[in-house]
Amino acid sequence: MRLQSCACQGIDVHAHVVPEHFPAYLGQHLPADWPSTVAAPPKGDLCHRHVMISGKQYRTVSEQCWNPARRLQDLPGMGLRLQVISPMPELLSTWMDASAAQQLLRYLNEQTAAMVADGGVALLGLAAVPLQDVDLAIAELRHAIGVLGLVGVELGSNVNGVPVGDPRFLPFFQACEAMDVPVFVHALRPTGMDRLVGPAPLQQVLAYPSDVGLAAASVITGGLLQACPRLRLAFSHGGGTLAMLLPRLQQGWQVFPALQDSIPVAPAEQARRLYFDTLVFDTPTLRHLVEVFGATQLMLGSDHPFNFHDRRPVQRVEDAGFDAATAEALIHRNAERFLGLPPEIAA
């Protein structure tokens, strides 16, 4: 039985921004992968721009990526009252020299904050940080949260091939915990690309879920949740492959003494402390994620405004056949808790 629609109550924690223009590099030697944009042919009444990285066209994006007014026009049709925006993951630039990346990410954070300000009460923003240098990342986090007013931070699933659960990143997560800052982990430059057969979009379609699943597993096997028990940590794309890997990891933990020695808390128990978005494009899969991770741990995600996004994230939850309390939790209650929203915004 379909629930009565929760009209425009949804909170989308997974949506992206790309600035219309990028700044000139202020250093002496322009990084080869410093991004830029050039005009693209319009589609309908929307302006578009090509994002150029390392001299190649990476993606073509519409003005909803940088124009808050155009973005907000889409939200009612998606059933949303609030959207959390974060940079397109390829802009996180963890492969750049850290000082160059910090300059770029400061600009992105300022642009995100400006969009939030222009969006009124409908937009919140996540920061980007140069995690290849933990000290610089902490400094940028403090500026983004304390000065710019962003409400959380977006990280890539790996930093130059090192998963986020690696102990070298622990001081950054400790800073997030101390500042009560939620962390959203997005798939980025995934492993296994050499095993894909087909065109470039398969990176997003197939490799992203694999990488974010391994990233989520790394925080379980690496002890991050024991080191940071109050950390609020979410993963994109429904946690990717984690829901399928988890039973095997749990069984292995019960069988192999080495895993029990290195993982002090059962993997299945730890996984139910993590948050995940609903961006899986399939209602049976969504129901399975709720069964595995718990009805308190799933939040709406859309990937708006890219072409490959869920255009009806609230309706997808409503169509999954959950009871009213579970649907309400997925549509907005869990996101309110994850983001730590004050009552005047959560209401």
Image (tube, rainbow, N blue to C red):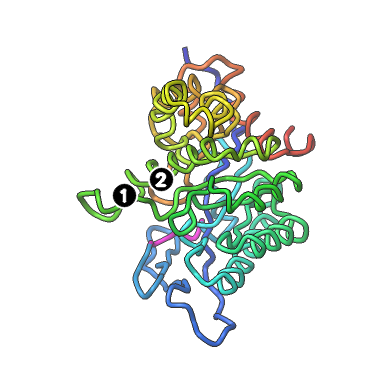
Disc 1 to disc 2: CB gap under 8 Å: yes
| Disc 1 residue type (three-letter) | Gly
Query: Looking at this rendering, what residue extends furthest in the left direction?
Result: 197
- Residue 325 vertical position relative to residue 338 in the rendered view, above or below: above
| Disc 2 residue type (three-letter) | Asp
- Which mark is on residue 203? none
The residue singled out by tag 2 in the image is 211
Residue in view at x 66 percent, y 43 percent? 182
- Residue 241 locus on image (x, y percent): 39, 35
51 to the left or right of 177: left
Residue 60 inside the magenta-drawn segment: yes
Residue in view at x 36 percent, y 75 percent? 55
Query: Looking at this rendering, what residue extends furthest in the bottom direction?
Result: 28
Q: Quadrant of residue 336?
A: top right
Q: Residues within 10 Å of mark 2 (few under 14, many from 20)?
A: many
- Residue 91 vertical position relative to residue 185 in the rendered view, above or below: below
The residue singled out by tag 1 in the image is 192
Observer able to see residue 181? yes
- Choose between 314 and 263: the one closer to the eye: 263
**The C terminus lies in quadrant:** top right
Residue in view at x 69 percent, y 53 percent? 150
Q: CA distance from mark 1 to mark 2?
A: 8 Å
Observer able to see residue 312? no
Mark 2 lies on a secondary structure that is helix
Q: Which secondary structure is most common in the magenta stretch?
A: strand
- Residue 72 vertical position relative to residue 40 in the rendered view, above or below: above
Specify start and end residues of the magenta stretch as a single range.
59-64
- Residue 192 locus on image (x, y percent): 31, 49
